[in-house]
Image (spheres, rainbow, N blue to C red):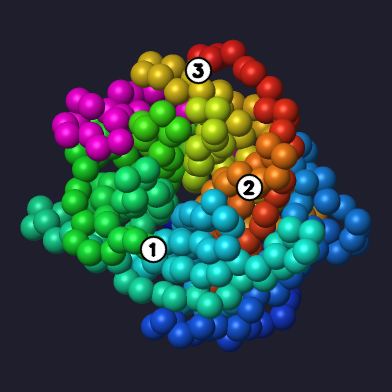
Amino acid sequence: MRLRTLLIPICALLAVAGGCAAVAGNGRPAASSVPIALDPDRPSLTEVGALRLRGALRLPDGAEVGGLSGLWVSDSGDRFVAVSDNGKSVTGRLFYDAQGQLVGAGHYDVRRLVIDKDAGYRGRLNDSEDIIRLPDGGWLVPFERTHRILRYGGAVRPEGTPRKLPVPPGLERASSNGGVEALAALSDGRILAIEEGDDDGVRERHAWIAPADPKARGDWQPLTYRAAPRFRPTAAAPLPDGGVLVLERRVTLLGGWGARIVHVPADSLRGGATMDGVELARLEPPLPTDNFEGLSVRPGPDGDLLVYIVSDDNRSPLQRTYLMMFQLPAGALKPTVAGR
């Protein structure tokens, strides 16, 4: 999502100076990223709520690797695929030290997504907002402005001519900049979609759940996602137990950027339910904050989970693209009551 309202004053207040790195698109490798501290004034700080920081990076400045609005990380952790809000896919490599700390990223490859060309579409067509890998190897990418979800093929990234899925009922009434930003392929084979909505103070957001390959609009069952006050959902990632993590983002003139990572249990993921999850962690100043819009989870050692988040710098010189990895210890997820 492009945040135009309040963007310049907020970013001017919150921009963080850092080292620069060269950008290379069109399949050429780029310079490595820049490691950052969770809090420069407290270099030993690693705990954020229930999460433990395992590495934080600033990715290269520039339009080619910027604007990231969705994230997928391989189970091995060595590569990632992201999409940007100008219709591009970005792949890259991730690097770790002997202790498993995330220490670098590079070898970026930026390519344009093939966009569907329905004559009935109006408005921008290439505002891609999330990315998920399906069990059969396909990819799903939701788009705002002209709201739709496209299914792609591709062995290592979304490629080829996409197929449009049936639009969830009611999504057509979402505002241009408030469509589906959070999409997840659940462990039981279903897919979950959550709309971002407007910055109107309303906590409840429309959501839908459907089989992995819905054939009709009626295959989408409605449910509700309840965010924290002034926060809006921007990404979701499945958990092995059937639940999901949801990333929420806030931006205000006085409070600046903020983000939450929320656990939604599996028993809330059913038609008619209200997903009211439990906050695991919150990022607010003086911690690194920006427009966090991408989330991915992969297995870690000893039953732990590794959680990645990435920020969308809106391709603005006043913002940053941060990639962070956190460890979620085994047993940290507590059961909650569904439908609260």
Residue wearing tag 3: 267
N-terminal label among 3 and 1: 1
Picture quarter containing residue 262?
A: top right
Q: Is residue 317 visible?
A: no
Q: Is residue 198 left or right of residue 145?
A: right
Q: Residue at x 57, y 55 (%)?
A: 76
Q: Is residue 291 left or right of residue 99?
A: left
Question: Which class describes the residues within 10 Å of circle 2: few (<14), some (14-19), or many (20+)?
Answer: many
N-terminal label among 2 and 1: 1
| Rendered image: mark on residue 156 | 1
Q: Residue 263 in the image: x percent, y percent?
A: 60, 31
Which kind of residue does numbered mark 2 sit on? Val
Separation of disc 2 and disc 1 at Cα?
21 Å
Label 3 with label 2: CB-CB less than 8 Å: no
As drawn, 228 above or below 292? above
Separation of disc 3 and disc 2 at Cα?
22 Å
As drawn, 296 above or below 206? below
Magenta highlight range? 206-231
Q: Residue at x 59, y 57 (%)?
A: 77
Local SS, label 2: strand
Q: Is residue 120 left or right of residue 150?
A: left
Q: Is residue 112 visible?
A: yes
**Is 221 covered by the magenta stretch?**
yes
